[in-house]
Image (cartoon, grey):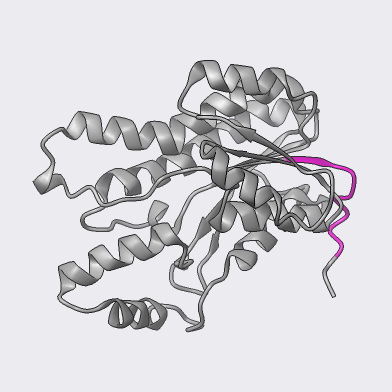
Amino acid sequence: MAIDYGLAGRTVLVTGAAGGIGLAIAQAFAVQGCRTLLVDRDAERLAAALETMPQAGATAFACDLCSDAEVRALASKIRAVDVLINNAGVEYPTPLTAADDVAGTFSRLLDNNVTSMARLTNALLPSIPDGGCVINQSSVWGRIGVPGFSAYVASKHAVIGLTRSLAWELGVRSIRVNAVCPGWVFTDAAQRSLAVIAARDGSDLAEARRAVLAQQAIAREILPQDIARSFLFLASDDALAITGQALVVSRGEVMA
């Protein structure tokens, strides 16, 4: 039986909600009786995701979060958001030794993964009530260094820094700001990264997958639903004293 987190009736906006962890988060909040707003740049996938929502009342908005104009247009349609979940982001290898355009590579990835969060949060601040909350998606790679993924890793470290700074800035309105740092969840993006790592190490995908699980204290796969439950907790009144934190959800792969 699902835990009741006391979130019924709240409005929750989830970015990157067309699939993977974002869709699992949106579905989890819908089960709790929340009004869910799904945002993604891929309108076709977003429409398909909307069909999978377990409760009626979900709304989808196609929006490129790297566009100031599109974010402003989105914000103009939103009257109130109790819980803002900045989940959208991209993940791909960026080996510095092979980069022809370092500035462009870092700029694009940081805009997708960090600036987009600040852009949307800023635009929606008038719609977030005092006592609301913001939860940002980081990664265990925001806690460690990983060869070949320097721009992505830098972006996820930056998400934690943004989270901590906004926790202070928005604390005057009792708005809590936290981050979640998932370990390996085998979404499409993670599978692509794992394939790159396997190729680098001269192994196959199955071997790389076993190596990932061997690095965890509990050697079991992490599911998108596992990550979604951490968002439910951080959004709930049970977490009212928690702000400025980066919660690691990795089955013990990273303990910090």
Q: Residue at x 46, y 55 (%)?
A: 139
Residue at image point 67% right, 21% down: 75
The answer to whether residue 159 is seen in the rendering is: yes
- For residue 247, say whether it is visible: no
Q: Residue at x 83, y 54 (%)?
A: 55
Q: Is residue 41 above or below residue 33?
A: above
Count of marks placed on residues: 0
Q: Which residues are magenta?
A: 4-12
> Residue 200's quadrant in the figure?
bottom left
Asked if residue 6 is among those painted magenta in the image, a careful observer would answer yes
Q: Quadrant of the N terminus?
A: bottom right
* Location of residue 232 in the rendering, given as x and y in whole percent from the top left corner: 73, 56
Is 253 situated left or right of 123 in this image?
left
Image location of residue 233, percent across then percent down: 73, 57
Q: Work out whether residue 153 or residue 57 is closer to the camera in this orientation and state it.
A: 57
Most foreground residue, 182 or 21 = 21
Seen from the viewer's position, the closer of residues 235 and 18 is 18
